Amino acid sequence: GTPHSKFTIKGKVTNESNSPIPQIQIRSPYGEDIPHADTLYTDSKGEFNYSFNGFFRSDNIPLLLTDIDGEQNGGSYAPDSVSVSFKDVDVTGGDSGWYLGEATKEITIVLKEKKEEIKK
């Protein structure tokens, strides 16, 4: 076995007016040598819950945000990315075996509207 933990990122995506943004795609490339990414979407309240099992992670977890539906969610938002670190977070509830417990981070991400492109 290998020591492992459950990690959860609870988040909310809003615009600059603090209104929630639904249907924002959130991708998390899990590592350089892994050819896939976890993908999820914000709900009608702009919230998401991303959980994964892994080794204790002191590095950053990248989250890539994309507005995939254009104006349907109330605006057209520029892509953005954030990194979430579990360094120095409390891991609780482990057993006396390989399971070390779980850790949760809560974040809010503010997306900016896309700037209108000037057509020549």
Image (cartoon, rainbow, N blue to C red):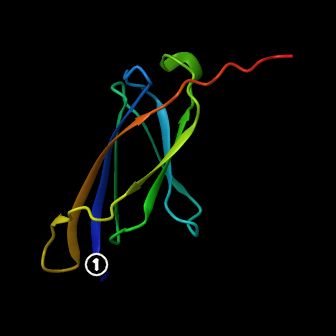
Image location of residue 46, percent across then percent down: 37, 29
Secondary element under disc 1, as helix, strand or loop, is: loop
**Within the image, what quadrant is residue 119 found in?**
top right
Residue 68 screen position, x and y as percent:
57, 30
Q: How many marks?
A: 1
The residue at the point 55 percent across, 24 percent down is: 113
Q: Quadrant of the N terminus?
A: bottom left
Residue drawn at x 57%, y 22% is 76
Quadrant where the image shows the C terminus: top right
**Quadrant housing residue 15:** top left
Left or right for 75, reference 104: right
Closer to the camera, 117 or 7? 117
Q: Which picture quadrant has residue 67?
A: top right
Residue toward you, 47 or 34: 47
Q: Is residue 5 above or below residue 104?
A: below
- The residue labelled by disc 1 is 3
Q: Is residue 11 left or right of residue 16?
A: left
Residue 43 location (% of width, % of height): 37, 30
Which residue is pictured at 20% across the width and 63% down the height?
A: 90
Q: Residue at x 28, y 51 (%)?
A: 105
Toward the right, the furthest residue is 120
Characterize the local packing of mark 1: few (<14), some (14-19) or many (20 or more) Cα atoms within 10 angstroms.
few
Vertical arrangement, residue 94 with respect to residue 111, above or below: below
Image x and y of residue 79, in percent = 58, 36
Image height of 19 relative to 43, above or below: above
Residue type beneath disc 1: Pro
